[in-house]
Image: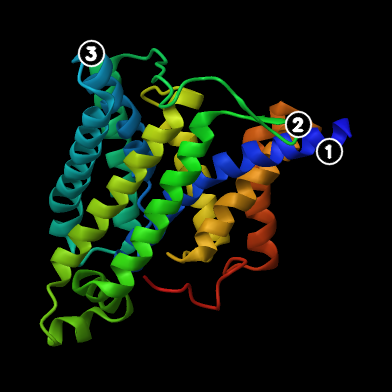
Amino acid sequence: MELIEQLLQYTLSGLSTGAIYALIGLGFAIIYNSTSIINFAQGEFVMLGGMLTLFFHVTLGLYLPLAVVLAIAVATAVGALFERLAISPLKDAEPIILVIITIGGSILIRGVAMLLWGKDTHALPMFSGDEPIILLGAAIMPQNIWIFGVTLIIITANRLFFHHSMSGKAMRACSFNRVASRLVGIDVKRMILFSFAISSAMGAAAGIIIAPLTMTSYDVGVMLGLKGFCAAIIGGMSTGMGTVAGGLIVGVLESLGAGLISSGYKDAIAFIILLVILLIRPQGLFGKGEAERV
């Protein structure tokens, strides 16, 4: 019975962490489908979400909901500015050059954050207290409920936007064929800007809801970004349920491995899973030769 409770505990923890990886992975997939590049600065927007919320809430003393809104707004603006200044001027560059630029952007954002907030690790207060909820013998923090709820809302809003709004449909059209999209009057450059803004906002939201559990610092986005990238690859770079499933798979297996084998392997497990899947099925578990577009 004790083993079952332990497995349930690890699974719940893994699902919570996996939900964060799924949100980050969706950010990677949205930009990839719009620009055919991997935005390795995505993890830094996760960091910005947590650090900006901490700044607005703790340093400036604003109410937490207002601090959250401002943090997401600023992170979104940074993402849009990054696209306008670094990506848009090089529209004819090779994808590998743009990937290198995103790596440079990641280093720049991380460096500025270190100068502004230092190297210390900071904690955001729990949204609904820190009294654990007991579920079938396993303890789950109220913050985990927030993670599940916010993730579900964002995924639902993401699907509604891309399938039922004019801008979302225009972004999907651009992901399939940019030339044809231009011919029918779609502003492709604006759609790419939207993709960076949306992915930045999603990354910031992920960073905010995970910060009370894992704490935050200037370099927290590096590992979270890489694991979100693993989730996107496993999901076939799909902006649908494939990437969500990829994030949950990585989170659960990581948690089970850390609990049943050793916590020292926690970070390595995600990359081992990625290598195995790339060897067996390079297009991802849920890819169909070519990833499902936005």
- Outermost residue on the right side: it is 1
Reading the image, the residue beneath label 2 is 137
What residue do we see at 35% from left, 61% from top? 158
Using the image as rendered, state which of residue 217 and residue 38 is in the foreground.
217
**Which label was assigned to residue 138?**
none
Which secondary structure, mark 2? loop
Q: Secondary structure at mark 3?
A: helix
User: At 23% across and 18% down in the image, what residue appears?
Assistant: 116
Q: Position of residue 92 (x, y in %)?
A: 20, 67
- Is 41 drawn above or below residue 198 in the view shown? above
Q: Kindly identify which residue carries mark 3.
A: 59
Q: Amino acid at mark 3?
A: Thr
The reply to whether the C-beta atoms of the residues labelled 1 and 2 are less than 8 Å apart is yes
Q: Earlier in the sequence, mark 3 or mark 1?
A: 1
Q: Which residue is mark 1?
A: 4
- Which quadrant of the figure contains the C terminus? bottom left
Residue 13, quarter of the rendered image: top right
Q: How many marks?
A: 3
